[in-house]
Image (tube, grey):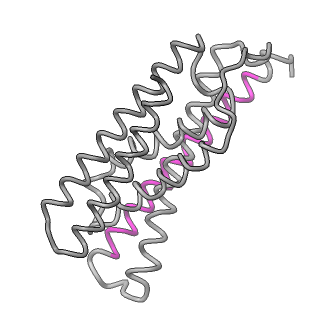
Amino acid sequence: MNATTLNLSFAFYLAALMAYAAAYLFSRPWLRKAGMAALAAAWLLQTAFLALRWQAAGHAPLSNQFESLVSMDWGITGLCFCFWRLAPGNWLGPTTAGLSLALLGVCALLDSSISPLVPALQSNWLLLHVSVIMLAYAALALSFLASAAYLTVYAGRSSHQTAVTLDLFNERAMGLGYLLLAAALVLGAVWANEAWGT
């Protein structure tokens, strides 16, 4: 059931990307709404996957590369919806779906087995430190997507209103990522002090 949930999430990300591509090719605005709905369904399925994984493992799904990457991807899509109104043009949905597909594709190559936590990770700091870092990476990934959209679509058109708003989106996403990363570094230092005494 757990693996099926993640596979369904992948399928909905793919459906979202296809809907956005069709909306662009055939100039059908309703297909953009379908893409957004598929993106939301993919995020909800990913949420269910992480909840089921947490229940099965008995700890937050942040203890290995597979879990961290799925959590980061979940954060990217979640923050995408939080930033939606700040995003000019129609670039945020398709780029988020594309990046999520790539990340889940990498996850398919990683070991997804659940193993017991090593003693250093058996702490509440695991949830605090790693989840804040994954959200920081998610915000910085949105900043990357905004920068890529700016450079590929609006390069040299700094007076264009969309380019100006895109720059503001990038600044806010980067600022959020910076603040979260700074907080994660402090949390990591406190955790290290508690775990190892230094």
Is 132 covered by the magenta stretch? Answer: no
| Residue 126 placement (x, y as % from top left) | 65, 22
State the residue in front, 36 or 119. Answer: 36
Residue 33 falls in image quadrant: bottom left
- Residue at x 55%, y 43% (from the top left corner): 136
- Residue at x 69%, y 34% (from the top left corner): 111
- Residue at x 53%, y 21% (from the top left corner): 53
| Residue 22 placement (x, y as % from top left) | 25, 68
Residue range highlighted in magenta: 163-191
Is 188 covered by the magenta stretch? Answer: yes
Q: Is residue 186 left or right of residue 148?
A: right
Q: Is residue 49 left or right of residue 128?
A: left
Report the quarter where the C terminus lies: top right
State the residue in front, 42 or 161. Answer: 42
| Residue 80 placement (x, y as % from top left) | 37, 49
State the residue in front, 30 or 196. Answer: 30
State the residue in front, 70 or 127. Answer: 70
Report the quarter where the N terminus lies: top left
